[in-house]
Amino acid sequence: MLRALLLAGLGLLPSSAPAEGKAAAQNGAQELTAEQYHAGLRTLRGYLQKRGEDTETAERFISVMATSLPASETHRVPVTHDVFAAFLRYQAAWARKTRDSKNPKVAPARRQEEAARAAELKERFRTMASVSSPVFYRVFQAAVRDVRRASRRGGREYAGNSAVFFGDQVDNSYSHVDAGDVALENGDTAGAIAEADKALAENPANADAYVLRAGAEYERRDDASAVKDAQSALLLDPGNPQAQAILSLSGVDAGRAALAKAVAGGASLADDGRRQGLPTLGGTIGEEAAGDPVASRPPSPTPAVGALLSAEYTSRAVGAAKADARSSIDQLDRALTLNPRNASARSWRSAILNRIGDYASARASADLSLKGNPDDASAYFDKAYALAGERDAAGTLDALNRAARIDRAYQPLLDKALQIPKPEDMELVFGEWAASHQPEAPPSRRSGYPLPLLALGGIGGLLALGGVAQLFRKGR
């Protein structure tokens, strides 16, 4: 009853009158408004909870679905009415099947009937979504995987019925992607490649499996294979940030002309997936896809790949700081896009901005670090340095005091800063301190230079840049 009311309220139920069949079909092919989409998700949240799903788990699932699908300028989201209706029917049937499968009072025949019905609706939804609303289908897959991954890595079991409900909603190839990503995280590149191979054997149109394999190959310095798999991933998922990063780090221009040339002759990959009835992201490799903002994409299903690529960008940024600080900052921005939890990249970004005199940006970067970790003493130091450059003596001392409370190693700097009579002289103290207190840089497994030499090169460049900035300010 609840499902029927929801579908009717959103105008998703098909008309039973023959004369209205054409109009109903046209309506079904239209995209939902953002209001309709979010209303449907709110009702689905309540429905799942009433069917025994854990509140936290259901909330996480709905949250990803709600935040990862951007609305257009016309306030519509990329999912058609008929696909969303199929999604709601599938979710309702799956939740009911999940609940009754654990209820001994439900007759076995009825459980079998509900399981068959749920499986039928699942396949119907997958087929429709892959053709009409591929972006929505990707968001759905990401939401399910995000719940599964958070539970597994959080070291806790699913609550309520969630072990069954979220255990097999995406096709089995994604279980291999999850296992391969964990293997890569543990340094097992061979295991990651083996799991990617298994995923692609089950679903040749699984772009994430290509990304996983490309990441493992890149880690093994097999650049030719990594580039080939990254290109295959981009055919299925144009704009995939990890695939683009692998091409960029491998020296391949991921632009429209270069990528089109690189994948010439391989365009049948996505078509093969469609012929098998498998979901693909479709689309074309062009400027619109390449410019897809990463912030609006669903969570990555291969975080270990993002982490290793992020570490590589960070390591390269440290080495680039001597020659071009702005280029170094750009690489750190890429590192943080691939892995927002990369504390080393965040710290280096703030440090470089401080030492070239861009204090406003350094302060903003430090504030972002503190938002993610309010007990980060080095971030308070970076903020204090930036405030000293902005001649905010009170703010400088407050940030330094907070740093010293967390880490007593900053107490000598605080004591020295308290003795500085002129605010404009305080930044010189920070420059001296920063020269001997560098952020930690992740080791590069691919660089031909030892990490200490990279770090020393970066430090020397930063000090030189800092000296130029100081001379420039004194000359004004």
Image (cartoon, rainbow, N blue to C red):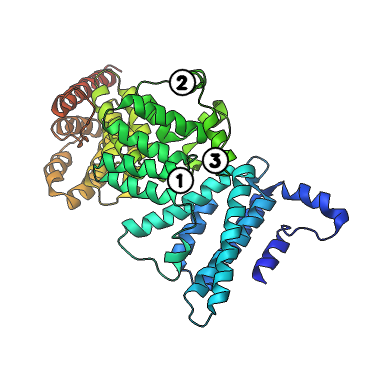
User: What residue would you read off at disc 1?
Assistant: 202
Q: Tell me if residue 475 can be seen.
A: yes
Quarter of the image containing the N terminus? bottom right
* Residue 304: % across, % down: 32, 43
Cα distance between the residues tagged 3 and 1? 14 Å
Crowding near pointer 1: few (<14 within 10 Å), some, many (20+)? Answer: some
Amino acid beneath label 3: Thr
Check if mark 2's residue and mark 3's residue have beta carbons within 8 Å.
Answer: no
Q: Quadrant of residue 413?
A: top left
User: What residue would you read off at disc 3?
Assistant: 280
Extreme residue in the bottom direction: 105
Q: Is residue 467 above or below residue 401?
A: above
User: What residue would you read off at disc 2?
Assistant: 262
Which of the two discs, 3 and 1, labels the residue nearer the N terminus?
1
| Residue that appears at 67% across and 64% down | 6
| Residue that appears at 31% across and 32% down | 217
Q: Is residue 299 above or below residue 337?
A: below
